[in-house]
Image (tube, rainbow, N blue to C red):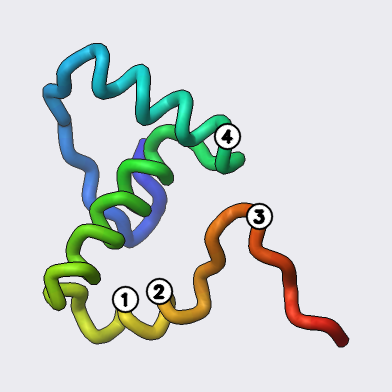
């Protein structure tokens, strides 16, 4: 079931592509669904098409493996 405030969408995808998404998600400690959303946001940001509300969230999101700033 979709999280509140999230749009549910059925996706037809090549099995080999899905397997790679699952592999990447596991490496980055995300679910496959979160990985798809991350990749979509990343693609939109590169094209300058990310909605304003998402730009603020994207600027604070960290890539896996990035260290947190010292306290």
Q: Secondary structure at mark 4?
A: helix
Q: Which residue is mark 2?
A: 58
- First reached walking from the N terminus: tag 3 or tag 4: 4
Badge 3 or badge 2: first in the primary sequence: 2
Q: Nearer the viewer, residue 40 or 63?
A: 63
Residue 44 sits above or below residue 39 on the image: below
Residue denoted by label 1: 54
In the picture shown, does residue 30 fall above or below 64? above
Query: Farthest residue in the right direction?
Result: 71
As drawn, is 62 to the left or to the right of 40? right
Q: Image quadrant of residue 8?
A: top left
Q: Earlier in the sequence, mark 4 or mark 1?
A: 4
The x, y position of residue 64, in whole percent, is 59, 54
Q: Nearer the viewer, mark 4 or mark 2?
A: 4
Towards the viewer: 50 or 3:
50
Label 4 or label 1, whichever lies nearer to me, is: 4
Label 3: state its secondary structure.
Answer: loop
Q: Residues within 10 Å of mark 3 (few under 14, many from 20)?
A: few
In the image, residue 35 sits, relative to residue 12, either above or below, namely below
Mark 4 sits on what residue?
A: 27
Circles 3 and 2: CB distance less than 8 Å? no
CB within 8 Å, label 2 to label 1: yes
The residue wearing badge 3 is: 65
Tell me how far mark 4 sits from mark 2, CA to CA: 20 Å
**Circle nearer the N terminus (4, 2):** 4
Relative image position of residue 23 (x, y in whole percent) = 47, 25
């Amino acid at each position: 079931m979709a999280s509140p405030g999230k749009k549910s969408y059925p996706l037809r995808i090549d099995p080999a592509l899905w397997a790679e998404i699952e592999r990447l998600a596991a490496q980055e400690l995300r679910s496959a669904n979160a990985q798809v959303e991350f990749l979509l946001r990343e693609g939109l940001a590169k094209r300058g098409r990310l909605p304003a509300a998402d730009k603020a969230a994207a600027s604070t999101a960290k890539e896996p493996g990035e260290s947190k700033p010292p306290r």
